[in-house]
Every structure is written in structure tokens, then in C-alpha cells.
Image (spheres, coloured by chain):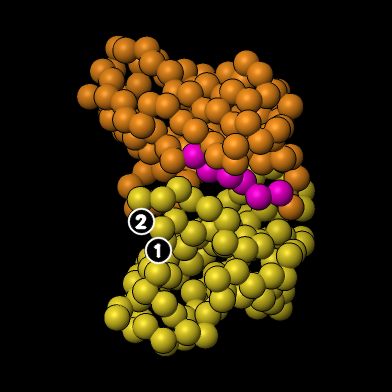
Chain colours: A yellow, B orange
Amino acid sequence: AQRVTQPEKLLSVFKGAPVELKCNYSYSGSPELFWYVQYSRQRLQLLLRHISRESIKGFTADLNKGETSFHLKKPFAQEEDSAMYYCALEGEDSSYKLIFGSGTRLLVRP
Amino acid sequence: DTEVTQTPKHLVMGMTNKKSLKCEQHMGHRAMYWYKQKAKKPPELMFVYSYEKLSINESVPSRFSPECPNSSLLNLHLHALQPEDSALYLCASSQSVLAYYEQYFGPGTRLTVT
């Protein structure tokens, strides 16, 4: 079964510290993986997707098929990074379903 | 116009009422979605429309009835809801249902069933 696990409900760091939001997935094929973010009082929006291999707002995420992980990283956290982060998976058999993890709230303290 | 809009923002309804949620996008997207999000939980997929045809119904109770009258509009008709149906209902759209395409989310309708 397709599943996304985000083990941390809350991650609190100080400004300038490195950040790593963990995401592990369960899927037998080749998944499409995404990070979505929801800032306070804003709508849910795409942050990045593994297929694009891009860096958005200083965040990167590398797909590790061996460890079935897609952790989100940023070397120096900023206060404006405080938000709810969801890892999401869509399988290659698709079924057009985006399956979200339970989310991690990132709090960046000044 | 690069936004998904949803109306109303808030809705309070009794268990015997009939109401509708509306979602609109003018980005030319051909896939539209309804999600349900309970407090402090991730969004859960309810329905997917592709080219105005229902592609997925995630075993949603019949008291929720989706409708896609044209490529820009998506409705969710509500009837005889239960208090446990109270949640944030999110609409999203994407160019296609293929996994590569980003889903654009609306701000949601916060529904309270009394």
C-alpha cells in the first residue's frame, strides 16, 4: 500500500540553523514525490517535486530509493520558513491520487 | 488568473439542509479535485474529475455529490450531512491528472454541520 510517513509533528530550530524535515514512503514502484507547504493563513502550495531536481527558497530534497526517503533540507533556516510542510506521493500507477503525509510544523525561532 | 477560488469561505448548515460548495479556476486545467481536511490532519482525497468526467470517488458517502458542469467549475452538493463531516473542504486543479503536474489549491470552505 502507498504510504507517506513524516515522523515529526513539530520541528523547532533557531534562525540560521540547518533544517531537515523527514519523509519516508512506502511504494513498490517508482513514485513521484512532492513537498507542499502551507504558510499561516495561506493556501496549500507546491514547494518542490523530486522530478524537477530544483531548489526553491533554499530548500532541496533528494530521493533516496534505497532508504525510501525524500527528506527536505535547508542549510540556514529563516523565520519566514515557519509553516506546515507536507510530503506527498503519487504512484506510477497513479490512480491520480496524491497521498499526503501527516505533516510537520516547522517553527523557526529568532 | 492563476488562482483557484472557492465559495463560500465559511458555511454552517443543519443536518437536514441542502447546500453546495463551489470551486472555479480559469487556468485551463483539465483536472479538478475535492479534498477534505480535518483539523491538524493532512488533506484526504474525495473526488477527481478529468476532462469533466468523474475519475475517482474515494468511497465517499452519497451525501456528498460532486458535479463538474464545465471545465472551469466544480461543485460539491451536500445533503443530510453529519456533524463529523465538519471540516475544511479544499478544491484543487492541475493541467492534467498525470503525476508530474502541480496541483493548485484553493483557500478552502470551512464547513460546520450542526
Q: The residue tagged with tag 2: helix, strand or loop?
A: loop
**Residue B11 at x, y percent in the picture:** 31, 26
> Magenta span: helix, strand or loop, mainly?
loop
Placement of the N terminus of chain B among the 4 image quadrants? top right
The residue at the point 27 percent across, 24 percent down is B12
- Locate residue B110, reporting x and y percent: 34, 34
Alpha-carbon neighbours of circle 2 within 10 Å: few (<14), some, or many (≥20)? few
Give amino acid for label 2: Ser
Q: Please, is residue B92 above or below residue A103 in the view?
A: above
Q: Distance between the residues labelled 2 and 1?
A: 6 Å
Q: Tell which circle, 2 or 1, labels the residue nearer the N-terminal end.
A: 2
Q: Is residue B69 magenta?
A: no
- B104 drawn magenta: yes
Is residue B59 among what the camera can see?
Answer: no
Per the rendered image, the range of residues in magenta is B101-106
Q: Camera-side residue: B20 or B45?
A: B20
Residue at position x 44%, y 56% in the image: A38
- Is the Cβ of the residue at disc 2 closer than 8 Å to that at disc 1? yes
Give, as a three-letter code, the residue at label 1: Ala
Q: Residue furthest front?
A: B1
* Residue bearing the label numbered 2: A40
Residue, disc 1: A83
Task: Please name whichever residue, A80 or B86, is drawn nearer the observer in this view of the structure.
Answer: A80
Residue A50: x %, y % from top left? 69, 66
Q: In this view, does B99 lie above or below B84?
A: below
